[in-house]
Amino acid sequence: MLTARFTAPAVPKTLVHRPELLRRLTAGVRGPLTLINGPAGSGKTVLTAHWAAAGGRAPRAPLWLTVEPDDAPGVFWAYVLEALHRGGVELPAAVGRPTRAEGVTQSFLVRLAAGLAESAQPVVLVLDQFDTAQPPAMTEGLDFVLRHAAGGLRIVLTSRTDSLLPLHRYRAAGEIAEIRHADLRFTHADAEALLGEHRLDISQAGIRLLMRRTEGWAAGVRLCALAMQRSPDPEAFVRQFAADRTTIADYLLREVLDAQPPDTQDLLLRVSVTDRVHPDLADALTGRDDAARTLAGLARDNAFLEQVDASAWYRLHPLFAEVLRAHLRQRHPGLEQQLHGRAARWLAGTGRLTEAVVQGAAAGDWPFAAGQLVDDLAIGRLFTGLEAEQLNRAFAPLPAEAPGAAPALVGAATRLVVQDLPGYEDAARRADSRLSPGSGAAARFSRAFLGVLAGRTTGDPAATERAAADAERVLGELPPPRVAAHPELRALLLAALGAVRLGAGRPDAAESALTAAVEACGGPGTDPGTQYPLCDALGSLALAELMRGRLRQAAEHARASLAVAEQAALPPERRSGAGHLVLAGVAVEHDDLPAARSHLDLATAIAAAGPRPDAVAAVLAAVVGARIAAYEGDGEAALAVLTRLRPAATATAASADTATAAPVSAWAVDELAVAESAAHLARGDAAAALRVLDASPCGRPEHLLARARALLAAGRTGPAARELAGLPADEGLAAPARLAACLLRARLAAAEGDTEEARRRQAEAADLARPEGLRLPPFAESGPRVRRALREAPRPSARRARPADGPPPVMAPPVMAPPVVESLSARETEVLRQAARMLSTEEIAAELYVSANTVKTHLKSIYRKLGVTRRSDAVHRAQDLGLL
């Protein structure tokens, strides 16, 4: 008898306390059977030893027996009796002892079960390492004794595999507690505690990376912790460690791979080249036909291979796969690339495009890998969708000299994804040299498609429009089902086309393309591949509406864009700051500078982490930032915001300090000039404001208004009036421009002594401001002194006449509530109508046949939606909005 087999292993000093699992163990031994099942190194024995060391929280301390794989039945039962004896369990002498190593008699099992049934207290016996290597006769005997001991025996089994015990019977009777591999995996908190025990200070991001690589495998986390202790830079070790060059490799090779028969080892080595494996794919890789049985057995035995979601597919633990691939290269040099090629063709034959492409790229078969992507019209998946990162990573090693048009097209796409314009142009030229009018429609479409997407960076609207027309024409040559299978293509095309039109200062034309892009996406929550273009198109739509002065529509599109990004959990590098940028612009028009600053900061942070912003977004970000500073009275800060962009816009090329890479349109040049003139006015320098505007003359209404404002500030009323006279009719002006023009005309009328005209213009301005919630920011551009006057002046009223002594020099801004955040329900509208009749809460309740509490609930909801706090304000707000 080996004494060591009766002693539980010592609990490690660096122990991770797992109270929930200990509690489940304690609860489990109230029944006859507890099974702790998991692969090598999953912490089965450590957990059980920790529980046993604490006495198992039972009247009698658990007994321990380590089972050896080669134990014969008679030897096993002899050890069981010895364990009971050493634990102080008194059995009748009639039980006897085994006399043959090969087995025991049924009468012995009957006597043992009867003796345990007579025990005063239940016996808890831990059978450690009780795997399927045990003979069936032994497990059958254990089952017999356990079922007939009348509760006198409780068994705790730790095993890498499911025992040959009839577990289904115990489950059906509710007489088994199970702790499985999923339960044994370390959580983030467990890993953090273990690293703390090793006195390792690892960042949260480092711990998440460690958990992702080890998938919570306890031994893997422990071995990494030990290696980190010896590393000069533990944080870097987590990012860089190669499993095949650590003690992890030794552990997995010895404990898992070497324990398998030669044919199974060969299968494991070959299937390690794929992320997941189907039995038929495994047969294609091995040239045999036994994979189904072998893979099922490995999964059942917890050999670091598990079934994927109860499907026919399996996956290896990533660390085990890494070790196997390194071992494959050592044992069979050159075979790995061949296996990737076989896997690529099998996967392509079963319609698994992404996996086939990745395997083809790993095999270095670039014409096949790129051809699959181009021929299937899947080149858009490099830009959007769940597989975008994986596909771009697969094509990262693509050599420029790879033959064929498809590799050149894919190379151009991957360069465009990272906005490497020179790299894109080189690859595009190679593709053009390899394409001909006789090339396949898919390849010709891919070239036109890339031309449209490149337009956002190259800033060539004419070339972009030509490419879009080519793409649309070639799409008509392709089978409709193939086109319909890739909705992301049309969505990406239209979103890019709309953005280019927007950058050219054509918001109306941009709106039609962007609206079509949103429709092509099919709405939120449809195809994952359309989530990014949907977010992008909505953001660009919001920018277009902001440029046109439609603030409510702009805010709605901006919020929708941000909502799509959140719901789709788009990573930072795939998000657009357009949503927050537009909300910042809207907040400026509503004179809510804290909100404007907050949204602008968010837009800037997203732009820093995400893709290079379009020229429109970069220009508007500078303009909004400058306007905020100007309205706060800091003209110098406003100019500083613009100087990073203004020289580049004047030269129609991006500077090194800006995020834009495309030439800047005439619209952008003038938009920056108008913003700079406003900044000079905030500094009280009307002459400088005029010089900036005169340096780049333009017929845009915004330019004429800015010039009129500067002339008026310089005291030149006559030229200011002539500028205003050159404006188009009101129908051709955006709401903010109409409002600014109206206010300037009011000031001119007042300066000329025409009190009645000034009063009429002021009342008109109030009516113009109300629908969009404008708070008259044009006058704030005249500087902090005027801004204070605006705030302190009395509010005009459309219901009573002005005092006879004439209007003030400027009109005070109407106190406008923020836009309605949510539509009123039919019942809430009815409650509001009754409130407008001056009825009390009780009278409204009687009128609508509801309780007073229900009316109060509706009123609270109405206040929240209208942004008010009192009933009278809610009525007035609803009247202003045309809701009553």
Image (spheres, grey):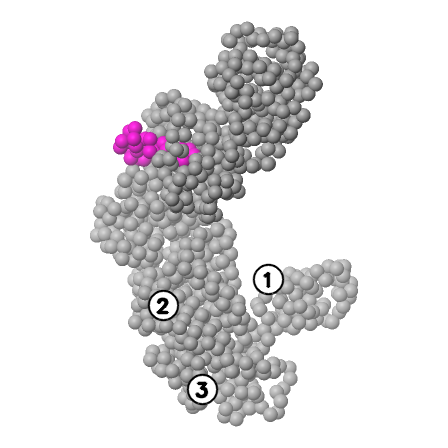
Task: Decide if residue 229 is in sight here.
Answer: yes
* Residue count near mark 2 (Cα–Cα under 10 Å), binned few <14, some 14–19, many ≥20: many
Residue located beneath label 3 in the image = 712
Residue located beneath label 2 in the image = 504
Residue numbers of the magenta segment: 316-343
**Residue 343 lies in quadrant:** top left
Residue 647 left/right relative to 879: left
Q: Which mark is residue 822?
A: 1
Q: Of the residues shown, which amino acid type is indicated by label 2? A: Ala
- Of tags 1 and 3, which is closer to the observer? 3
Residue at 36% over, 82% down: 691
Along the viewing direction, whichever of 684 and 198 lies nearer the viewer: 198
* Residue count near mark 1 (Cα–Cα under 10 Å), binned few <14, some 14–19, many ≥20: few
Q: Of the residues shown, which amino acid type is indicated by label 3? A: Leu
SS at mark 3 in the image = helix
> Distance between the Cα atoms at labels 1 and 2?
34 Å
> Distance between the Cα atoms at labels 1 and 3?
41 Å
SS at mark 2 in the image = loop
Q: Of the residues shown, which amino acid type is indicated by label 1? A: Glu
Task: Decide if residue 706 is in sight here.
Answer: no
The disc, 1 or 3, on the residue closer to the chain's N-terminal end is 3
Along the viewing direction, whichever of 488 and 19 lies nearer the viewer: 19
Residue at 52% over, 12% down: 75
Marks 1 & 2, CB-CB < 8 Å contact: no
The disc, 1 or 2, on the residue closer to the chain's N-terminal end is 2
- Of tags 2 and 3, which is closer to the observer? 3
Residue at 42% over, 86% down: 711
> Where 214 falls versus 37 (above or below)?
below
Dominant SS type (magenta):
helix
Residue at 47% over, 40% down: 198
